[in-house]
C-alpha cells in the first residue's frame, strides 16, 4: 500500500524549514494564510527552492475571495504559473470556477498548458462547486494530478463522508488530498475513514517578535487578534505529532 504523505501549508521559507525539520515530505508555499492563501513572491519561491530539500508546491491565487476570475486576473495567474515553473518548483496549486459553480474548464486548460509537465493540484475552490462528483470527473479528464478538498465542509473531519466517496470515485486517476483543520487529534480518524493517503495540514503557532523596542497600539493591519509583535509560522512539534499518530495505522 502507498505510504502516507504529509503536505504542510506554509507562509514563509522559515515555516518551510520548520516543516522539513519535522519530517514533512512536501509543502504548499503561500502568502496571506489568514485570507485563505494567496500567491507568494518571486523571492520567496526562489529562496524556498534554494534552501529546501523537500518538494515545493506553490499556490497561485491573485487575491482572496471567490474563484471567479476576470481576463486580467487570468493573465496574472498564467504569468505567475510560468514564473514559478521557471524557478523549478515541484507543483502548482490553482483553480477557478464559473458563475454557476462549475469547474472553469477553459481557464483550467490554460493553467495546465502554462504548467507544462509540472504536476497540477486543483485547490479548495472545489469545495464551492455545485456538484462535487461531476466536478471531480471533469478535472480527472483534464489530467489534474491532485485535488485538495475538505469534502465541501468547513473542516475535513466534518467532510469525512464526502471525502470517502471522493477517494473511491478518484480511483488511481487522481489523488484526493484532504485538508482543513487536520491535527494530531483527528488525523487517525480521517485517514482510517476516508482511506486517503496524502494529507494537507498547517500546524501553525504564534511566536513572539524579537523586537526589543515595541510601540504598542499602532496597528499596521486589520487583524485585531494578531499584533505586529507576533508571527504565525509552522510549529514543528505539531507536524511531528501528526506524523507520529499516522504511524499507529
Image (spheres, helix red, strand yellow):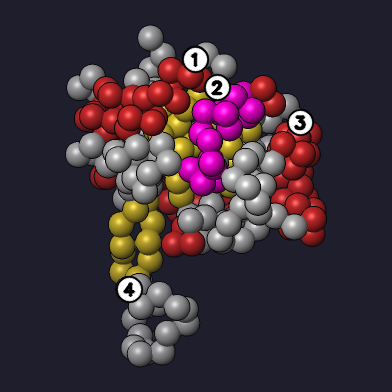
Q: Taking 209 as reference, is 249 left or right?
A: left
Q: Residues within 10 Å of mark 4 (few under 14, many from 20)?
A: few
The numbered dot on residue 174 is 2
Cβ–Cβ under 8 Å for marks 3 and 1: no
Quarter the C terminus occupies: top left
Mark toward the viewer: 2 or 4: 2
Give the camera-side residue of 155 and 47.
155
Judge whether residue 136 is colored magenta: yes
Cβ–Cβ under 8 Å for marks 2 and 3: no
The numbered dot on residue 116 is 3
Work out how far the residue at label 2 is from the one at label 3, CA to CA, in angstroms. 18 Å
Q: Taking 245 as reference, is 159 left or right?
A: right
Q: What x and y, as percent, mark residue 37?
A: 52, 55
Region in magenta? 125-140
Q: Which residue is mark 1?
A: 171
Judged from the image, the secondary structure of the residue bearing numbered disc 1 is loop
Amino acid at each position: 500500500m502507498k505510504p502516507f504523505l504529509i503536505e504542510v501549508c506554509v507562509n514563509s521559507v522559515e515555516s518551510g524549514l520548520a516543516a522539513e525539520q519535522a519530517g514533512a515530505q512536501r509543502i504548499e508555499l503561500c502568502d496571506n494564510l489568514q485570507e485563505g492563501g494567496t500567491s507568494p513572491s518571486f523571492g520567496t519561491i526562489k529562496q524556498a527552492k534554494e534552501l529546501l530539500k523537500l518538494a515545493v508546491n506553490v499556490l497561485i491565487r491573485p487575491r482572496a475571495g471567490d474563484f471567479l476570475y476576470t481576463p486580467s486576473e487570468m493573465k496574472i495567474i498564467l504569468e505567475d504559473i510560468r514564473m514559478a515553473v521557471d524557478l523549478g518548483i515541484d507543483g502548482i496549486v490553482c483553480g477557478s470556477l464559473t458563475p454557476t459553480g462549475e469547474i472553469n474548464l477553459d481557464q483550467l486548460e490554460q493553467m495546465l498548458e502554462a504548467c507544462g509537465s509540472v504536476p497540477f493540484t486543483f485547490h479548495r475552490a472545489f469545495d464551492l462547486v455545485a456538484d462535487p462528483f461531476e466536478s471531480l470527473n471533469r478535472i480527472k479528464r483534464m489530467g489534474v494530478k491532485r485535488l485538495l478538498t475538505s469534502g465541501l465542509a468547513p473542516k475535513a473531519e466534518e467532510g469525512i463522508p464526502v471525502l470517502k466517496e471522493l477517494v473511491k470515485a478518484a480511483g488511481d486517476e487522481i489523488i484526493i488530498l484532504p485538508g482543513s483543520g487536520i491535527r494530531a487529534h483527528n488525523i487517525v480518524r480521517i485517514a482510517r475513514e476516508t482511506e486517503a493517503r496524502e494529507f494537507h495540514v498547517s500546524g501553525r503557532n504564534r511566536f513572539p517578535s524579537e523586537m526589543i523596542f515595541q510601540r504598542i497600539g499602532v496597528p499596521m493591519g486589520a487583524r485585531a487578534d494578531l499584533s505586529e509583535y507576533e508571527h504565525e509560522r509552522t510549529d514543528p512539534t505539531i507536524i511531528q505529532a501528526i506524523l507520529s499518530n499516522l504511524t499507529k495505522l
